[in-house]
Image (cartoon, rainbow, N blue to C red):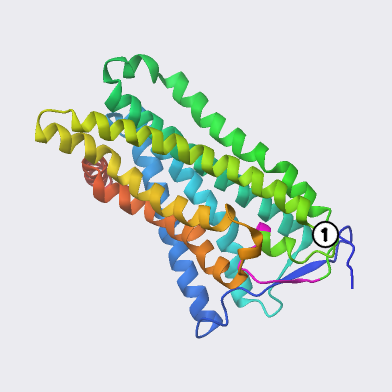
Amino acid sequence: MAFNNLTSDLEFRILSFSALLATPILSFCIVLAIYIFNVSGNSLIIVVTRMDYNLYKPMYFFLGSLALVDMSYTTVTLPKSLEIFLSPQKTICFVCCMMQMYFFCSVGVTESFHLAAMSYDRYLAICNSLQYNRIMTNRVCVFMVLGCWISGFSSVLLPVILISRLQICNLHINHFFCDVSPVIQLSCNKTKNLEMFIFFTASTVILGTFSVIVFSYVKIVISILHISTSSGKKKAFSTCVSHLIIVLIYYGTLIFMYVRPKSKSNLDLDKQTAVFYSVVTPTLNPLIYTLRNNEIKNSLKRFNNFIS
């Protein structure tokens, strides 16, 4: 049976993770705790990087913007998941589903561009330190961040429009939110050309930004090896390790999800993998940065003394 996408009462049923956890209440409590930790941790980073004059540096400007991206990442999906856990219907309307898909993919692409921009910033700071302050001005940093957001929200617009025009034959989404692959598999249409277009778009963005990061870190490692003192090497490495940890976790799962043939796709495995790049990484980012960065830790101590 085919459904008309234009009807206002068309709704998808989200299968989510309820069957894997003991009760919907337990699912609700776990997701709520994760979401609160994500929002509070990323909000704290945004506030600290904006209020502490000692952190008025390009690195922390990008970090504050990345925290906003991470908070947006989970806000697109988790509040609706919380509603679904407690709802008997466990449904999402067609328009809401398309909007969730668009904003989720847009924020995901924005995060990829942010991580690439941060790696380029570290590359300049370590490999071209004499010219760093001249190149990375406040204006350049603002334009780079705006470019990340604009690129993210513009690059996924056409794919989502094409997906929204598909004829739907199944209303059960085997996922915890409206992601691309689970929704496409509900279609009655032949989707090979659309899947190839989405694969090309995702590969270009993911592998393109990942290549920038890899190039930057290869140059950084070479520069660090040429530093004569062990303390200098340690300081240079410490400024990059947090970013590198996040990149490995995020891109590892992202490449597995989107840069592979759809014939290898398994929705149950995809659903579990999606938790890492859509929930775990954005939630762990504040913790990783605060544990590995002395300037952030000192700033948090000053902030705590200020409010107490």
Camera-side residue: 180 or 14?
180
Camera-side residue: 29 or 126?
126
- Relative to 125, residue 16 above or below: below
- What residue sits right under mark 1 in the picture? 190
Q: How far across and how far down the image is residue 49, in percent?
A: 35, 37
* 10 Å crowding of disc 1: few (<14), some (14-19), many (20+): few
Q: Is residue 3 magenta?
A: no
Total numbered labels placed on residues in the image? 1
Q: How far across and how far down the image is residue 265, in percent?
A: 62, 65
Q: Is residue 171 magenta?
A: yes
Can residue 62 be seen from the camera position used here?
no
Taking 96 as reference, is 273 left or right?
left
Residue 303 position by quadrant: top left
Q: How far across and how far down the image is residue 133, in percent?
A: 33, 17
- Point 34% across, 50% down: residue: 245
- Point 26% across, 45% down: residue: 300
Residues in magenta, as a range = 170-180
Looking at the image, which residue sits at the far bottom?
22
